[in-house]
Amino acid sequence: MLRLLIAISLNLLLLPPLALPSTGGVVGRNADTAGDAGRYQRYPTALGRGRGVGLVLSGGGARGLAHIGVIKALEENHIPIDYISGTSIGAIVGVFYALGYTPDEMLQLFKSQEFKYWSSGDIPERYRYYFLQYGNDARLLTLSVARQDSLFRLVLPSHLVKTTEMDIAFLELMASGNAVARGDFDHLFRPFRCVASDVYRKRSRVFSRGDLGTCVRASMTYPLLFRATEMDSALLFDGGIYNNYPWDVMVREFGPRIIVGSNVSGNYPQPAPDDLIGQLGILIMNPTDYALPDSLGVSVETQLPGIGILDFDQADSLVAAGYRQAIQAMPQIKARVRDRVDSSTLAAQRNYFNRRKPPLIFSRDIEIEGLRPLQAKNIGKAIIKKRNAFSLDQLKHEYFKLSADCRIDRIYPTARYNETTGHYKLNLRITKANRLDLSLGGNISSANLNNIFLALDFKLFSLFMSRIHASGTVGHLYSNAEVGFRQDVLRALPFYYAFGYRFSRYDYHTSSPIAIFDDSRPPYLKLRDSYFYARFGTPMSYNSQCELALNYGFRYDDYFQVPNFLKKDVADETFIHYLYTAMEMSRETMNHRQFPTLGQEWIVRLAYLRLYERNTPGSTATQRLQTFHWHSWYGLHARWRGFIPLFDEDRISLGLLGDAQLSLRSAFANYTSDLLVTPRFTPTLTTRSVFVPQLRANQYLALGMVPSIKLLPNLYFQIQGYGFLPLRQTLADDNQRVTYSEWLNSLYLFGEANLFYHTIAGPISLNVGYLPGWRGDFWNDMLVSLNIGLVLFKRMGTEY
């Protein structure tokens, strides 16, 4: 349903580009006609009504890239563009022209990787702040709980795409041009107007001055998709709701002699009874007058049937289509427009405007709204540090750090240029998140991986930032419960400390995955782990951290050491009382929690365990006496996984994995009890859903290769292939006591094929795994499962 809502919302969406051009000017142009360029700065206000050419750009989603082709055709034919008005994508294309971008530069913006981040809400890898991210759990939907009067109410998400990246990009792309114009849109490279919608007052709002980025951001804010833009206590949305082709704005604001319009949209036709998208479009969008009167100018109509609202990957063909339509209309345009502008003059004018853009250097004087004075002071110190001024890149690092904090709902940045200091004054409008969150998640599976996830988070935003959390997973194979507290101290050297309690249960017996040709009885293995923990951590870099861990707990393992047993039989039981300490360093930038296709992660963990083992034999055990043992050992675990893009970012990528484990410890009372505490290598869904003795060893090396192919947007096919080499394999003798194989005498090869589709509600996947020797023959060693949701497991207290 969420995917459908996105598709509906984007039907009229006008998405802006996200590339990051130089704020210091357009490189490689001469300014030998700087005198003419200087005179041109007075041209817009001196031109007067009834003169000049006005360019009007409609909304229309990805189809709006045709506007760039129209502009290109006008420039090549020396048709001047003296004024610009636009809505949504028209406002985006129009403002870039008004900021001094050439058509070719605009096209590159829309084709850039940054634009993909902007439109999808993804954060670039270098700005994913690992230190403040939630733990690796199965939450899919988070609802806030707000208190109103004496009642509590659920706050549904107001938008589907995160705008963190988009908001900072508007500042980055437009603040320097706005500085040149001093906030007056008449003094941009070309005078500019954009249209937004005040839905409360049910009217359009036309912007002629103010913060340029905020005004254009309002013009393209489609309801439900992007977060609303707040200005003068009004919530503003996409201008296309009331006026999707603002030629009337052009007439009223500038009154040019002739208008050239570029229209790629139209009113919705009468929808069919089963046409949900058409029906909702009628409800949201008001009719627009797309008929530009002949007396006012020429409208270039670019019809693009079959082009989807998200087909920005067809940017070249869309621009070419607009260019062709403009060339066809050029005789009419030339007949109506007498003036011409040569290319060298136009280039000089652009160069003059771009060279006047001040670089984005910010002063120490930061204005923070929405917080108490002491809170604002602490955040200001975190941004400024000991610097007298800071750059855009330094701002973005601190901005994304703060945005990653679950206690902050939104940070909206704007900047105003101070001509005296030569720096920008930064304004941050911060909205605190609601204190209480309710999160839901889980997985629906054809195998034994069904589970339901529920979490509550209570957040405190004070001098220090704190979070109290409780979560639970109930499933067939795996269940978990946790309650904890974490406090973050965001100083020059940030750190956190946390403590809590965690319970986990595994049941490999009553749960049974699907084997293709076999339904034999699974082994009887039930594990219950319960421990208290304490953590202390600090970031090492933007994507990595160092953590100290302490676990103290108990564990009960129930099992039979024989394949056949009766209902009346009593299982063996191993009770473990343990103390676990560890130091780990880790890094994580994966683009998805499950089935990633980009990014990398690594972890190095050194652990020390001291534990007490009590083994109580059951009715089928060969050993009848209860035994007691103390064990202590060190364990070292190192793991690296990364994806290398081979073609078009993530169209084809190659994942590589390396995993090594080293520990030296004494054997437990019997083979099964020993195996249950032996480190395991489980990189696939299949290996996590069943108990595989061959993938457990105290010392091992493992390598993997994971090629991924994007078949369609969000639809991938992935093959995972792994090799597992135990240095010495754990074996059982005739009395079920532990013995070991010769060194390096067995190599275990296995794999899994996945077809998966990433949705906002989690992945949908079809998985076929192969585990040689698990059931005894080729076909029965294959397992198939269909999953909808996330399947994630938290570490037990003795795992390292």
Image (cartoon, rainbow, N blue to C red):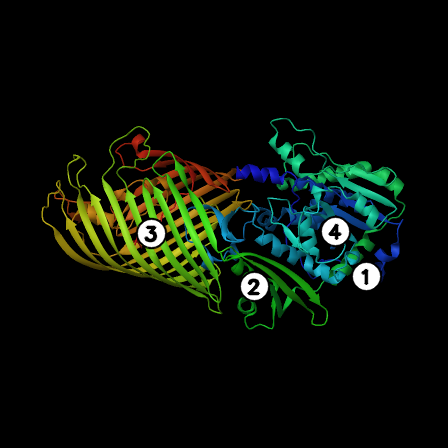
**Disc number lying in front (4 or 2):** 2
**Disc number lying in front (2 or 3):** 2
**Disc number lying in front (1 or 3):** 3
Element assignment for label 4? helix
- Calculate the distance from the C-alpha at mark 4 to the C-alpha at mark 1: 22 Å
**Callout 1, which amino acid?**
Asp
Q: Crowding near pointer 2: few (<14 within 10 Å), some, many (20+)? A: some
Question: Which residue position is annotated with label 2?
Answer: 371
Q: Crowding near pointer 4: few (<14 within 10 Å), some, many (20+)? A: many
**Disc number lying in front (4 or 3):** 3
Task: Tell me: 484 left or right of 691.
Answer: right
Whether pointer 4 and pointer 2 mark residues with C-beta atoms closer than 8 Å, the reply is no
Q: Which of 314 and 129 lies nearest the eye of the viewer?
A: 129
- The residue positioned 40% from the left and 55% from the top of the image is 469
Specify the quadrant that holds the C terminus: bottom left
- Which label was assigned to residue 32? 1
